[in-house]
Image (cartoon, helix red, strand yellow):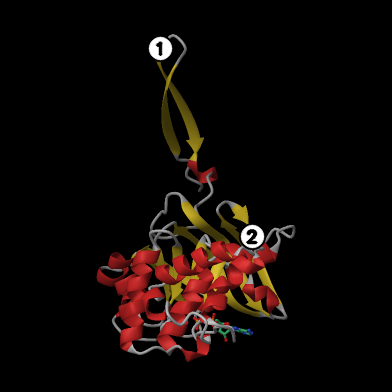
Amino acid sequence: MKSLLEKVVIKANESENQELRVQIERRDTTQEEESPYIGIDIKDPIVEIENLTLKYSDDPALIDISLKIPKNHVTALIGPSGCGKSTLLRCLNRLNDLIDGVTITGTVKISGVDIYDPELDVTELRKRIGMVFQKSNPFPKSIYENAAYGPRIAGIKKRSILDEIVEKSLKSAALWDEVKDRLNESAFSLSGGQQQRLCIARAIAVEPEVLLMDEPCSALDPIATSKIEELMHTLKKNYTITIVTHNMQQASRVSDYTAFLYLGKLVEYDKTEKIFLNPTRKQTEDYITGRFG
Ligand code: ADP
């Protein structure tokens, strides 16, 4: 038998004659839609993913994911290999569109704009959403030209403006002091860690709204890794960072929020300390304590 629950909502309004008027609505809560979001409720998110399902041909890689990502924080996507972390990250700049046989349902909004709207200019989107990959991929150009690449594509020609952007981006990527006297040398003359910071500088030179990082430290030594981790702490003042990492210590060190995925589903999403110190779901606990994965 259907139980009919009544929920009383009281709204207090000041009426024109300044008397307090109380309005009572009775709602049948069995009619209300359940929120698709699990875990922590993010107020004022920059990214809103709702009921996102992605299939590679017939194989689902993401199943009904709903997740809100807060602005100016670091959000980590964790989970065992193959659980869909990179696929989810790539949905945020529509990089999966380039793969044959992919079908995507659901919605992804960034700053309130539906990024899967067929009218949307994907090139423009990718300027708003920067990405740094696992393996650093500087262009075969000078250090300067790597950092100036995005602004040049955006049509900036004036040398003094480019100089300013290059310096600012390299400073933001904590690389300026190491390269300021060799800006015209090839990017390949840098160490692996420096190359990765150059890629971060290149990504932020166009001031993206969101910076996606797909295991950005997995090819780096511990010192280079700690530099990038420190960098994330400073970058989040100006950028929203979403990072995929298989390294749980890294997720706990760098992120404010953590989403745990398993077999394409979002199992738990919360503040990082909650996920690591007191997770709600047993699956999360088993994963972070190394019982599987
Ligand atoms: P993770 O980043 O968590 O390791 P991925 O997002 O890379 O996981 O992969 C999720 C699932 O999607 C895996 O089963 C993987 O084999 C599959 N997958 C990823 N990329 C492709 C692709 N380009 N074509 C087909 N299947 C893919």
Q: Is mark 2 within 8 Å of ligand 1?
A: no
Report the front residue among 286 and 210.
Answer: 210
Three-letter code, disc 1:
Gln
Three-letter code, disc 2:
Ile
Split into quadrants, the picture shows ligand 1 in the one at bottom right
| Residue that numbered label 1 is attached to | 18
Question: Which mark is in front, 2 or 1?
Answer: 2
| Residue that numbered label 2 is attached to | 115
Q: From the image, which quarter does the C terminus lie in? A: bottom left
Residue for point 51% across, 45% down: 30
Report the front residue among 35 and 271.
Answer: 271
* Residue reaching furthest to the right: 119
Displayed quadrant of residue 129? bottom right
Residue for point 45% across, 62% down: 240
Report the front residue among 283 and 206.
Answer: 206
Q: Which mark is residue 106?
A: none
Q: Earlier in the sequence, mark 2 or mark 1?
A: 1
Residue for point 36% across, 82% down: 247
Displayed quadrant of residue 287? bottom left
In the image, 33: left or right of 73? right
Report the front residue among 237 and 265.
Answer: 237
